[in-house]
Image (spheres, rainbow, N blue to C red):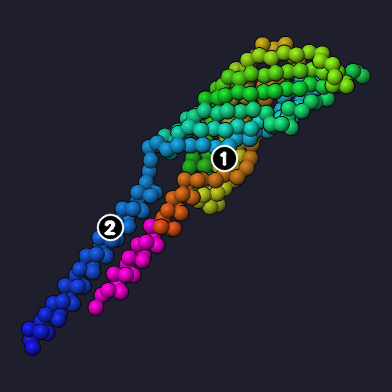
Amino acid sequence: MKRIIFLFFFFILANTFYSQTQLDSLKLKFQKDSARTYRFKKVRPWIALDQRNSWIKNTKGLQRIPVTINGLQFGAILKEKHTVGLGLYSMNATSQKPVKISDGSNKITYQELLLKYSTLNYEYVIVNTRFFELDVPLEVGLGRYVYNLKDSSQTALLWHEEGPIKLTGGGVTMIVKPLKWIGLRGMAGFRFVAFNKRTNLNFNGFYYSYGVWIDLRQIYRDIKFYGFIRPKYRKKVKAISASKP
């Protein structure tokens, strides 16, 4: 009888010890998987849509013509501080429509402009907290412009030219992050554009953009952790606890 009682308690203790060992091992794996999911990366890919609002000056007509330039940026983020990459930009369809130009007299003309360019981008993170980020973006680039000047009926071509452009620019980007993966982003800067100037256009000027900021990496991390890693851990803990005598 004593042997039976001894074996019974020995079985309980052994099973409890084994269950605790399983729980400790499971907890260690959970911590390791969690740390890996949210780990610091020296290099990670980067892609962004960039829509800039700006103006192009027509010095003859003394007009500031609003334009919108759409861009795609891609590259890499190094040590969470430095972003390097390429940018591809072109004016949107609305900005390419003919614009009425008046030089102060009764003569009316219409200008058409197409602007495309590519850039090398660099951005440095000055401040990056849970709720706020401040960056300094810089860029240099090459591109091409096409300029047409038409009469008041937009049927006769009065002037046509096209050629290369060189540009440099810089500014400030601010991001407010009420949530970890979504917030508001605003940017303002100034660009300098050099080209073989034969028109009355001036491409130098300020630009700005604003919109929604989304951290796809954080979304992926949270989905992986809260959707898979943690539920799987809790399910296994529950199963081990249920097997205890």
Q: Is residue 6 above or below residue 14?
A: below
Secondary element at tag 1: strand
* Residue nearest the viewer, comparing 145 with 155: 155
Direction from residue 57 to residue 27 in the image, left or right: left
Where residue 42 sits in the image (x, y, percent)? 38, 37
Within 10 Å of disc 2 (Cα), the crowding (few <14, some 14-19, many 20+) is few
Quarter of the picture holding the C terminus: bottom left
Residue 106, by quadrant, is top right
Residue type, numbered disc 1: Met
Residues shaded magenta: 229-245
Report the amino acid beneath label 2.
Answer: Leu
Residue where numbered disc 1 is placed: 174
Position of 11 compared to 171: left or right?
left
Closer to us: 11 or 155: 155
Above or below, comparing residue 18 to residue 164 in the picture: below
Q: In this view, does 84 lie to the left or right of 30?
A: right
Point 60% across, 35% down: residue: 50
Residue 176 visible in the shown view: no
Q: Mark 2 points at which residue?
A: 28
Q: Which residue lies furthest to the bottom in this view?
A: 1
Magenta region, main secondary structure: helix
- Spot occupied by residue 121 in the image (x, y as percentages of width and height): 52, 28
